[in-house]
Amino acid sequence: MKDYLDELEAEAIYILREVAGQFDRPALLFSGGKDSICLVHLALKAFRPGKFPFPLVHVDTGHNFREALDFRDSLAAELGEQLIVRNVVDTIAKNKLQDAKGKFPSRNALQTHTLLDVIEEFEFDACIGGARRDEEKARAKERVFSVRDEFGQWDPKLQRPELWSIYNGKIEKGENVRVFPISNWTELDVWNYIKRENIQLPQIYFTHERECVITEHGQLMANNEFLNLDETDRIVTKKVRYRTVGDMTCTAAVESEAFTVDDIIAEISDAKISERGATRMDDRISEAAMEDRKKGGYF
Amino acid sequence: MDLLRFFTAGNVDDGKSTLIGRLLYDSHSISTDIIETLTRQSKTRGENTTIDLALLTDGLRAEREQGITIDVAYKYFSTDKRKFIIADTPGHAQYTRNMFTGASTAQLAIILVDARNGITDQTKRHSIISATLGIPRVLLCINKMDLVAYSEERFNEIVSEYNVFSQLIGLNQVDFIPASALAGDNVVHRSERLDWFKGLPLLEYLETVETDQREQLEAARFQVQYVIRPQTENLHDYRGYAGSILSGEFHTGDEVQILPSGLTTRISRIESNLKDVPSAGKNQPIVMHLEDDLDVSRGNTIVPKNAAPVTERSLEATICWMDHAAFNSTQKFLLQQNSFRTKAVIKAVHSKIDIHSFRDLESDGSLNLNELAKVSIKTAEAVSFDPFRDLPKSGAFILINENTNQTVAAGVI
């Protein structure tokens, strides 16, 4: 019997090659997180010995973990692929935007501006991303080829029908398509694939000691220079790891003893809390938070 | 572990979303934070005693407001035996095109009926869509058995009525399960209240059901998605055709034909997983190399020299019209079959299929949203295809409106 990972891998490679075949200026959004690292691995299988038919693009919020940024730079250099980085701070200055405020200032909404700017700057017609449908229920609704208008907006009520393995990427100039090759993968599938393919990851996915602040919801936030803490905040040192690598201001760590990929697979198999639920502060705001962000041009 | 993709369809109030919620909930596939959120949402909606399981799948604001499913939601769960991808599709006639989207990749259809109402027009429509798409197996889940006092007689009545209908429309293989999603009978756990039913409860059925591959075709088929040409010093002459094998097996040395040009050559090399391999089979992504330097580009089909498919510019197909704007005969389309695209027009609309009775209706030449029809299509370049019933990956296509770029129809040849 065929292994399901072979099936998911074949589907993702097929989708990546469709992007290369259908678009003039695609890009792969690469953050140094596990999902986009898997995308890069899949792109190697899809296009080597040729170069990737797209650059790697990172929207740097300025709140990223150093470990993820270093990993991003070294992987791009090792592969000899082009890496384009655009910074949210520059967009804030250029577009005279209000920076994020509060104890945990999240630039999550602001990064949409930078993303739309970089799409315009390079005239990208397709952006490949590592979003998965199991992450969140608005994402569960999105097509593999998700057409966005010139403002980057997703219209969930007017999605194109998407049948079999036939992807329609026809668009007008100015529009773009967001493409999600690992739509059908779950968090556990990603880890099983990382194990099978022996894919290297930044160290923050594995257990380490870290100074953390405990939030009012009991989440553990890395103590870092971007937080606006006061004397009521308690700093504790915990053994933690990250299930998802986002901004230091809105991504929480989980207590963990997982040293290896096998440990992580065992941990996730037993976990009673979802990936985003455990780690994201931004989704707690409302049940339609993600749908609203996507309508505004977010990934 | 293998993977089963299935879709669910039902009437508005058949309890489809509740059934999926029950499947996920009772198989412990839902995380505690999501259950907490649901409990909070269920309370704000006034259902303060139990969790509204439908809220698990209805992911859009408009869906939650209206209590209906508008577009496909994909859900994932696994047991020790299998991994599952559920496409939860809308039941409303007006969202039929979204149902097609969810159903097109499924190996199994679960069609829900309310035990009180039995087979309805919607049930028939969902069944006809399943038959049109050639879904290998259909499960009729007779839900809300609690509301008919778990009556075996009522269950049998519905079974015999459906058997007649499914034969008429030519469904491949049909199974039946009585259940109550709300009460949890026969979804994950066998129910004592349905002790007369000797079959498996839903989850066990899903874990063990065989959806035999209808793909009869043994002949090898490959379509080019992308040409890899590094053009670097050490790979100066490298020219690899990247794509996926649709059926059969290819070996190095095989004599092959390129379609639609008809040029012939031999396979000089096959790469899979970045390594040279002597042969490769169905569904494998590969890079193929040919002995001769021919004009081969994206969308070309490569087949064994002696087992070529039909290659024609005139096609007879059954299509589902998916655009809000009705068809008009001045429209120009792009026909897309996997990676192959060519200009196309609909020359004639022969007959429409009544999606409730499956009868052919006389055509007036029109085509409206969600209608099924038999049509003649003319293409600019010849299309190489195997009939859909032999190889769905080859006999299926979409039509794209050249003017709006929208996907306006799905078709099977």
Image (spheres, rainbow, N blue to C red):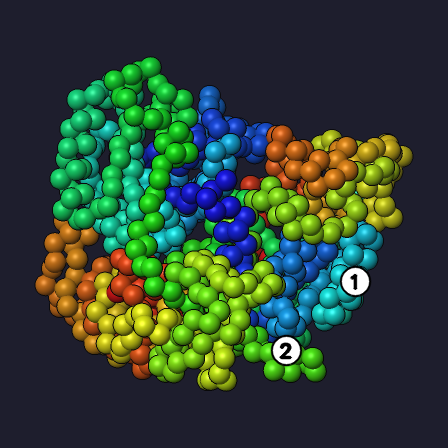
Q: Amino acid at mark 1?
A: Asp
In this view, the residue in front, A160 or A255, is: A255
Q: Position of residue B5 (x, y in %)?
A: 41, 45
Query: Which is more foreground, mark 1 or mark 2?
Result: 2
Q: Which residue is mark 2?
A: B230
Image quadrant in which the C terminus of chain B is located: bottom left
Instruction: Give the residue drawn at x 38%, y 77%.
Output: B257
Residue B223 appearing in the image:
yes
Q: Which residue is mark 1?
A: A73
Q: How many marks?
A: 2
Instruction: Give the residue drawn at x 55%, y 30%.
Output: B35
Q: Position of residue B376 (x, y in %)?
A: 20, 72
Give the Cα distance between marks 1 and 2: 23 Å
Instruction: Give the residue drawn at x 77%, y 41%.
Output: A206
Asked if residue B3 lies left or right of residue B383, the reply is right
- Chain letter of disc 2 in the image: B
Asked if residue B58 lies left or right of residue A88, the reply is left
Q: Is residue B340 above or below residue B127?
A: below
The residue most toward the left is B362
Residue B324 appearing in the image:
no
Neighbours of disc 2 within 10 Å: few (<14), some (14-19), many (20+) = some
User: Under tag 2, what secondary structure?
Assistant: loop
- Chain letter of disc 1 in the image: A
User: Under tag 1, what secondary structure?
Assistant: helix
Q: Amino acid at mark 2?
A: Pro
Instruction: Give the residue drawn at x 74%, y 50%.
Output: A201
Asked if residue B218 lies left or right of residue A43, the reply is left
In this view, the residue in front, A207 or A173, is: A207
